[in-house]
Amino acid sequence: MKKALLASALMTLVVPVCMAAGPVGFGNSPNNHSQPQGFSLNPMNDIATLKKNAYDDQLVTIKGRFTKQLTKDKFEFTDTKGQTIVVELDDDRNWSFIRKDALVEIVAEVDKYFKGIELECINARNLEK
């Protein structure tokens, strides 16, 4: 009985302290509550750098333009230096705000294959009005 009482007393002291602290040790400040902690997007300056350094399933951001439709849901994306990559826009989302040749910034997941690399677009925002 004493052990159970002691264990419950310790739990009432330890649990609130652990819950109040929140996740730490992921590279973000524990006081930043505006976004989940421990996740980072990797900004890429150009597609050449992306193709050279990106790894499968990595989340990246890159600026460019959708310049050509290749299939129903795959598009050619051209960065600000004129380099291209295939980007998939899944039809389960509404992408009607994207205009051909308009400057956008995309958040995408890298898909590496034997034959090459593609991006699966998760989010996009217009940089031109």
Image (cartoon, grey):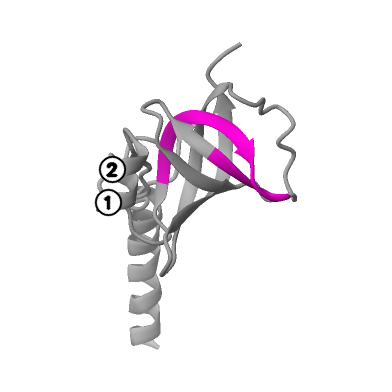
Q: Residue at x 47, y 33 (%)?
A: 78
Is residue 67 shown in magenta? yes
Which quadrant, please, contains the N terminus?
bottom left
Residue 26 in the image: state x and y as whole percent.
28, 52
Residue at numbered disc 1: 52
Is residue 64 shown in magenta? yes
Whether pointer 1 and pointer 2 mark residues with C-beta atoms closer than 8 Å, the reply is: yes
Residue 4 in the image: state x and y as whole percent.
39, 83
Residue 24 visible in image: no
Up-down relation of residue 71 to residue 31 (above or below): below
Q: Residue at x 53, y 18 (%)?
A: 127
Question: Is label 1 in a helix, a strand or a loop?
Answer: helix
Instruction: Determine whether, in the image, residue 101 is placed left or right of residue 54.
Output: right
Q: Nearer the viewer, residue 128 or 19?
A: 128
Q: Main secondary structure of the magenta part?
A: strand
Residue 75 in the image: state x and y as whole percent.
61, 43
Residue 30: name its quadrant: top left
Residue farthest bottom in this picture: 1
Q: Nearer the viewer, residue 6 or 52?
A: 52
Q: Which mark, residue 49? A: 2
Q: Amino acid at mark 1?
A: Lys
Which quadrant, please, contains the C terminus?
top right
Q: Residue at x 43, y 65 (%)?
A: 115
Q: Residue at x 34, y 61 (%)?
A: 13
Question: Is label 2 in a helix, a strand or a loop?
Answer: helix
Q: Which residues are magenta?
A: 60-76
Residue 85 in the image: state x and y as whole percent.
47, 45
